[in-house]
Amino acid sequence: MTFSSNAAARQFAVVDVETTGFGRYDRILEVAIVVLDESLEIIDEYDTLIDPQRDVGPVHVHGITPSMLAGAPTFDEVAAAVRARLHEKVVVAHNLAFDQRMICGEYERLNAEVYPGRGVCTLRQTGEKLNCACRTYGIELEHHHRALADARATARLLQRAFDRAPFGSPARISDLRVPHNPRTLRREANGCGEVTPMERLVAATRYPTSDGLLLSYLDALDWVLDDLVITQAERQHLFELALDLGLSRGEVMSAHRKYLDCMVRAAMRDHVITEAEHAAISQVARLLHVTDYEIPDVTETTAAPTSIAEGTRVCFTGTAVDEYGEPLRRSDLEAMAASAGLQPVANVTKRGCDLLVAADPESRSGKAARARGFGIPIVSVDEFVEEIGDRR
C-alpha cells in the first residue's frame, strides 16, 4: 500500500455509534472509536455504553437493554474522553453522515462548538452495507451492530479499500466545559453476557479528585477491579504504585473511601439501591479493606403483583421480542391483554393505570419513571405472557 505525502501528520478516528433511533431527538447508546496513525496502523481504541436518559429504542437491532445501561456513564461524562480521540483527527465512519450527525447533536446539547471537518465515508467508498463490504474485502465481522466490532471492521476497510491514505480535514471540538472522566462501561465485542451490578457500579464510578497522583492510582485500581477480583499480585502492584507516587497509607485509604462514595452516587442515580447493588458495594469495600464504611440501606421497591386480575388496566412500554428474536408489536400485546379480560391503556397515570408491562423492567422510559413515581407495579413481557397464557 502506498501513501500520499499529504498524509504525513494525519491521524484518523474511525467511529461507530449505536443509537435509540434515527431521529433528531434520538440519543447515543454506545460509541466506539479506533484511532489510526498516518500509516493507517491502529494506535488506540475506545468504547463505552452510554445511558441515554430515555427509552433505548429497538433492542432487537442493537441488542442493548435498559438493564445493561444501569450505571453506565451519560454522554456528558464521557464527552471529554471522546473529544480527546476525535479532536484534530479525520473522522471515518461507514455512513459518515449519520454518525457525525449523532455525535454533533450530543456535543451541541453540551453547548460545545463542533467543526466536523471533511471526513471519510467507507460506505461511499465501497458502495455496500458494512457486512457486505466486509465479505467483499475478506474482513471478519462478528457481532454486527456492536459499536466496537463495527468500528474495527470499518478501520480494516479503511486499510484495504484505499490504495492511498485518504484525504480529509480534521474535526475540531471546542468550548467543552466538562471534566475529563476516563471511566467506561464496555460491551465486549467477543460476547456480551449479562452485566453484573458490581460491573455496572465500578464502571459508573467517577474519579473523586483532580489530583494527578491520585488519578494515576485510581486509574490502576479501576483496571484491577475490571475482573472483579484483586489478586495478591495485583494488591502488591497497587502498593508499589502508591509508594512510587509518594502516597501515604492514609491518602490511599481516603481515596478508597471516596471511590466507594462515588459508587453509592452511581447506584443512587435512579433513586433506588437494590439488594444486588448493596451487595456489590459491600464486596468492593471488602476488597479495599474499608471495614467501617456505612452503605445506605436497600431501598424498598414496588413489588410485582402475584397475579393479574381480570379488568386490570395495563400499559406497555419498550420493544419486546418473541422466542424467535422477532419484535413483538404493542398492538399484539394489547390484543393479548384484551383477550385475557384486561383493559389496555395508552398512558401511565396515577388513577388510570394498574400495571406497566415493560420489555425490560429496568427501563428508563417516561412511562417507567411515572410508574415508579406512582407506585405502579412493573413486570416484564415474559412474566406478563406467562401469567395470562392460560386465559386466552
Image (cartoon, helix red, strand yellow):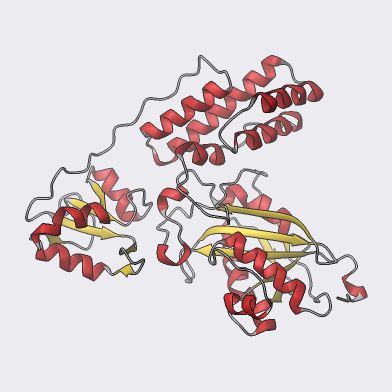
Residue that appears at 76% across and 72% down: 159
Hey, which quadrant is residue 295 in on the image? Answer: top left
Seen as rendered, the residue at the extreme bottom is 127
Give above or below for 162 relative to 186.
below
Q: In this view, does 203 lie to the left or right of 359?
A: right
Percent across and percent down for residue 361 are 32, 49
Residue 227, visible in the rendered structure: yes
> Is residue 258 found left or right of 324 in the rendered image?
right
Which quadrant does the C terminus fall into?
A: bottom left
In this picture, residue 385 sits left or right of residue 112 = left
For the residue pair 312 and 107, the one nearer the viewer reads as: 312
Placement of 143 over or under 224, stated as above or below: below
Residue reaching furthest to the right: 5
- Quadrant in the rendering for residue 274: top left
Q: Judge left or right: residue 337 versus residue 202.
A: left
Which residue: 42% across, 34% down? 277
Residue in front for this viewpoint, 46 or 173: 46
From where the camera sits, is residue 175 visible? no
**Residue closest to the eye, 10 or 192:** 192
Residue shown at 41% from the left, 52% from the top: 66
List x then y, in percent, for residue 212: 75, 33
Quarter of the image that includes the N terminus: bottom right
- The percent coordinates of residue 385 (x first, y second) are 20, 57
For the image shown, how many numbered marks are present on the structure?
0
Q: Residue at x 15, y 58 (%)?
A: 389
Q: Where is residue 380 in the image (x, y as percent from the top left)?
A: 28, 52
